[in-house]
Amino acid sequence: MGGITLDGVEKWFGDLQVIKGVDLEIAPGEFVVFVGPSGCGKSTLLRMIGGLEDTSRGRLLIDGRDVTDQPPAKRGLAMVFQSYALYPHMSVRENMGFSLKTAGAPAAEITRQVDEVARVLKLEPYLDRRPRDLSGGQRQRVAIGRSIVREPTAFLFDEPLSNLDAALRVEMRYEIAKLHRTLAATMIYVTHDQVEAMTLADRIVVLEAGRIAQVGSPRELYERPANLFVAQFIGSPK
Ligand code: ADP
Ligand code: MG
């Protein structure tokens, strides 16, 4: 589960075309990283997959189902962004269980799910704390935990670590890689950090002005960049 297909996807903001025909097949369980310079369309493309932006042209499919015109709630995806607003008046446990509660899940089921996710993310000692009593990295883990409890088929991350300091970024990068192995869920991850891209990705998608410049494994892009733009972006010696 969690295969995602982009079929000739375009995005126009008025007269400005920012996504210019993207075709991409993402396998279930794959870790795909979008990279490219600021303004190339990474966030827009991710938001279109998540349903936060509508698709001007083309189709989006999840597990073969056309979701192009479906609202975010019907897509079964979890979205984690760099600004992870937690509810300040709620405990970690309440924050993590909130979406299940609003979906009408029974209390015992919410407790079971939150305990399980807290175990995976090592958040058990913090379940009764408020967000203000957590470190930046712990808060980011809660934000990820909150998205996991809904058992999404895929995760969309938009520069989730860019507000953290360097040491925490390394730790969280490791946590996300572990999470990917544990959940075996599809992940699409936007970053402008080459090291994050190279270490996390099964495949990297290099975007240039709304188009795919190249798609490949980190090794393929490093050893055989399609052009100078990719080479410079990946930091390979071409
Ligand atoms: P990235 O995430 O790669 O930095 P974005 O997807 O945020 O790039 O933006 C791609 C382009 O689309 C940019 O030129 C940006 O100014 C433009 N853009 C993004 N959102 C909007 C919007 N709501 N209205 C108009 N232009 C937008
Ligand atoms: Mg962006």
Image (cartoon, helix red, strand yellow):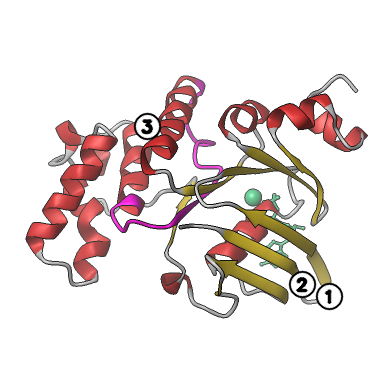
Q: Which residue is mark 3?
A: 137
Q: Is residue 64 magenta?
A: no
In the picture, measured across the screen, residue 26 lies left or right of residue 145, that is: right
**Amino acid at pointer 1:** Asp
The residue at 79%/24% (across/down) is 235
**Amino acid at pointer 2:** Trp
**Amino acid at pointer 3:** Gly
* Label 3 packing within 10 angstroms: few (<14), some (14-19), many (20+): some
Q: Position of residue 129 (x, y in %)?
A: 16, 39
Tell me, yes or no, whether the two marked residues, 1 and 2, touch with CB atoms within 8 Å. yes
Q: Which residue is mark 1?
A: 15
Disc nearer the start of the sequence (2/3): 2
Q: Is residue 89 visible?
A: no
Q: Position of residue 42 (x, y in %)?
A: 68, 52
Q: Which mark is residue 12?
A: 2
Magenta residue span: 148-166
From the image, give the main secondary structure of the stretch colored magenta.
loop
Work out which residue is located at the far left of the displayed protein and give it: 108
Instruction: Pick the residue in front: 37 or 132.
Output: 37
Mark 1 and mark 3: span between their CA atoms?
40 Å
- Select label 1 or label 2 by which is in front: 2
- When the figure is inspected, residue 26 is found, relative to residue 237, above or below; the finding is below
